[in-house]
Image: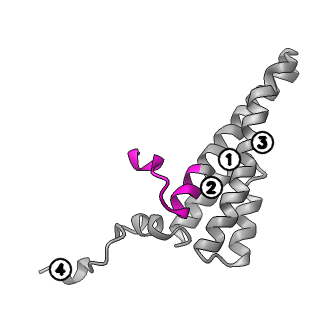
């Protein structure tokens, strides 16, 4: 978990902003329930602003990651569309990691750990 806040690569930045975007989406939905259910008009002011910032940052970082990680157009569009439904950015991040679209994070998901050692050849 401590590695989650290390933002040294496009893949790690993408993972971070995907989670932040999802959290702010959920916070905005809760604030909307408070606004329309409880009549508190100011309830969406801060969550709305935070989600707006996270949404734009997600799209910018998605474009950066797509270029840096050499995503095809379909993967890029899927990543961009994932920002629309609540919390789908996290779903996309998991899918991209499992399918090898997130560089070194994909290596971690497959158990390779990002190193170049062939573990099968080391077994005696």
- Residue 12 position, x and y percent, is 51, 58
Q: Are marks 1 and 2 in contact (CB under 8 Å)?
A: yes
Dot placed on the residue nearer the N-terminal end, 4 or 1: 1
> Coloring scheme of the render?
one colour
Q: Which mark is residue 108?
A: none
Dot 3: element: helix
- Residue on which the image places disc 2: 91
Dot placed on the residue nearer the N-terminal end, 1 or 3: 3
- Residue on which the image places disc 4: 122
Q: Which residue is drawn at 63% across and 60% down?
A: 92
In three-dimensional space, the C-alpha distance between marks 1 and 3, rounded to whole angstroms, equals: 14 Å
In three-dimensional space, the C-alpha distance between marks 2 and 3, rounded to whole angstroms, equals: 20 Å
Dot 2: element: helix
First to last magenta residue range: 1-16
Comparing marks 2 and 3, which lies closer to the viewer?
3
Dot placed on the residue nearer the N-terminal end, 2 or 4: 2
Q: Residue 52 carries which label?
A: 3
Dot placed on the residue nearer the N-terminal end, 2 or 3: 3
């Amino acid at each position: 978990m401590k590695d989650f806040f290390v933002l040294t690569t496009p893949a790690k930045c993408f993972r971070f902003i995907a989670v932040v975007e999802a959290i702010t989406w959920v916070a905005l939905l809760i604030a909307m329930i408070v606004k329309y259910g409880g009549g508190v008009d100011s309830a969406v002011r801060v969550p709305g602003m935070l989600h707006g910032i996270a949404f734009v940052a997600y799209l910018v970082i998605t474009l950066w990651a797509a270029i840096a990680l050499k995503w095809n157009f379909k993967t890029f569009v899927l990543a961009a569309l994932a920002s629309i439904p609540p919390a789908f950015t996290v779903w996309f991040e998991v899918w991209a990691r499992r399918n090898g679209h997130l560089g070194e994070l994909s290596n971690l998901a497959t158990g390779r750990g990002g190193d170049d050692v062939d573990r099968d050849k080391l077994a005696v």
